[in-house]
Image (cartoon, helix red, strand yellow):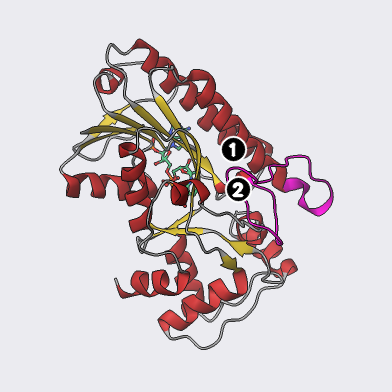
Amino acid sequence: MKLILAGGSGQIGRLLNRYCARQGWQAVSLTRTVQEANDVFWDGQTLGAWTEHLDGADVLVNLAGRSVNCRYTADNRRQMMESRTHTTQLLGQAIHKCQRPPAVWLQSSTATIYDHTLDHPNDEVNGVINDQRTGAQQSWNFSVQIGKAWERTAQEHCPSSTRLVCLRTAMVMSPDRGGVFDTLRTLCRRGLGGASGDGKQYVSWMHEIDFVRAMHFLIEQTHIQGVVNMCAPEPIPNTLFMKEIRQAIGVPFGLPAARWMLEIGAVLMRTETELVLKSRYVVPRRLQEHGFRFEYPRWKEAVRELVCR
Ligand SMILES: NC(=O)c1ccc[n+]([C@@H]2O[C@H](COP(=O)([O-])OP(=O)(O)OC[C@H]3O[C@@H](n4cnc5c(N)ncnc54)[C@H](OP(=O)(O)O)[C@@H]3O)[C@@H](O)[C@H]2O)c1
């Protein structure tokens, strides 16, 4: 099996590269900075020699996009949007030129596409998608707009001969340095791992082992196409989520962070409070209906496994 990982140098790309190596699959990462033996240069903007690698590959995974962990200035917003829609459009153009196009295109999207909900979970059928919120949550509309534009671009540019799956991915948890779990664990170790805001917002997450297993499942299940929520079946409120991390690492207390403290912290850390305050109450209906079995459905066990490594 040969996979092309566009944007394969990032956190998720590294997980997939490792999984491919274990499976004995060939993985090629398209990157703007060639570093590894299996890296191939692309600029993310133009067709070039990289397209030869796509021709005859079995799977295309598109992970490319400017990190959303930044201040949402006008310039950063433009980069976040364009780095996703342009690369997706470019990959569509490249597939159209292939003599033997990949059978499946696994396209990144985001669980943040769903509305901030506290009272009901969002699945692929009944989930609420609303980018017209007003008031305090208006700034969260942009992430929803990114998700919608990302999926729409892939749908418009994917040829009918290739099966398209849009991955509405929640936070993927792995112990790798610099990842989201590493950051949360560090905060907890420093006594700062209390609830964020009122702590009622839900956290959707997925253990890295289940993430790569689900990707494998989606490659093999040739009848699955369209949107798929990539998250564990048991999202939990932020208060409980943080408490489980503290318990797993043996830190009894975590200072809670009020909303105003988070706002100040986000400015200092050049990030946005949406990443911790928006409720992501998302469940993997389609994966479960198609028979995918999670090794880590519950955060309690997942976090203990992550801490042990
Ligand atoms: N990690 C998660 O938990 C999570 C959850 C939901 C959705 N997602 C989405 O899934 C995708 C992969 O996530 P990740 O955590 O692996 O992201 P990441 O670590 O930020 O990696 C993304 C990759 O995109 C490439 N990239 C950045 N800007 C680009 C541009 N302007 N043109 C072309 N390529 C560009 C970079 O590769 P080079 O610099 O090597 O070219 C980078 O390695 C992202 O789009 C992210 O938004 C991730």
Q: Is residue 34 left or right of residue 96?
A: left
Residue at horizontal 79 percent and vertical 45 percent from the top: 133
Q: Residues within 10 Å of mark 1 (few under 14, many from 20)?
A: many
For ligand 1, tell me if the residue under mark 2 lies within 8 Å.
Answer: yes
Q: Residue 262: image x %, image y %?
A: 67, 66
Q: Residue furthest bottom?
A: 252
Q: Is residue 79 left or right of residue 131?
A: left
Residue 211 position (above or below residue 34): below
The amino acid type of the residue labelled 1 equals Gly
Instruction: Name the quadrant containing residue 293.
Output: bottom left
The amino acid type of the residue labelled 2 equals Thr
Q: Residue tagged by mark 2?
A: 112
Whichever of labels 2 and 1 marks the residue nearer the N terminus, that label is 2
Magenta stretch: give its range: 114-139
Q: Residue tagged by mark 1?
A: 147
Q: Is residue 135 magenta?
A: yes
Q: In the rendered structure, are the residues bearing label 2 and label 1 in contact, judged by CB atoms less than 8 Å apart?
A: yes
